[in-house]
Image: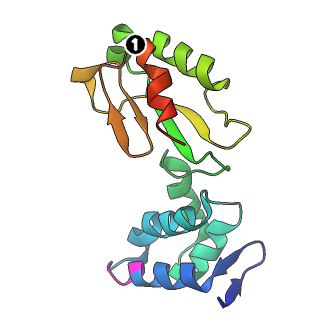
Amino acid sequence: MSTLIKTDRFVLSETERSAIEREMHHYEDPRAASIEALKVVQKARGWVPDGACDAISEVLGIPASDIEGVATFYSQIFRVPVGRHIIRVCDSMTCYIGGHESILDSIRDQIGIQPGQTTADNRFTLIPVCCLGNCDKAPALMIDDDTFGDIQSGGVAALLESYQ
């Protein structure tokens, strides 16, 4: 059974707290462990709920505002619940010229949501990103940690179907 650590607005599990403490010891300055601490919470919960920054700051011994700054800066840290699979569609100029709009339209048609939304079954969240660093294979998208380039709108359905 896991012991819970309580703060005013959030509860860290003992497992989360221990993982954050382990990460903290890898860095001279505890602020440097902020992103790793946020990733610990996100891995356990799927997102970083309100109040998590206060709980993390208590463990790291730094101001919650420092944690909040990191959490809001990085687009890979989710501050709202997201689906099991995150679809990131590149909307950089290169991908836009390469057919970004038709890919985005195809994804919207297949899963029935707009960018920034999550499907009702929590299967997918669709997020536009400014660049995936895959410009030589535009248009590009990522699903979870998998990057795909030279995407054609006709191949979107099969690609999405492979992510249950």
Residue at the image position 68 percent from the left and 60 percent from the top: 49
Instruction: For residue 90, say whether it is visible.
Output: yes
Query: What range of the chain is rendered magenta?
Result: 23-27
Q: Is residue 26 magenta?
A: yes
Q: In which quarter of the image is residue 152?
A: top left
Q: Identify the element where label 1 is drawn.
A: helix
Which kind of residue does numbered mark 1 sit on? Answer: Tyr
Residue at the image position 65 percent from the left and 88 percent from the top: 2
Which residue bears the numbered disc 1?
A: 96
Q: In this view, does 83 lie above or below 7?
A: above
Per the picture, the main secondary structure of the magenta-coloured stretch is loop
Q: Quadrant of residue 150?
A: top left
Residue at the image position 48 percent from the left and 78 percent from the top: 20
Q: Is residue 42 left or right of residue 129?
A: right
Q: In this view, does 105 lie above or below 116?
A: above
Count of numbered tags: 1
Locate residue 42, reporting x and y percent: 55, 61
User: Which image quarter holds the C terminus?
Assistant: top right
Residue at the image position 47 percent from the left and 34 percent from the top: 88
User: Which image quarter holds the N terminus?
Assistant: bottom right
Q: Is residue 73 left or right of residue 3?
A: left
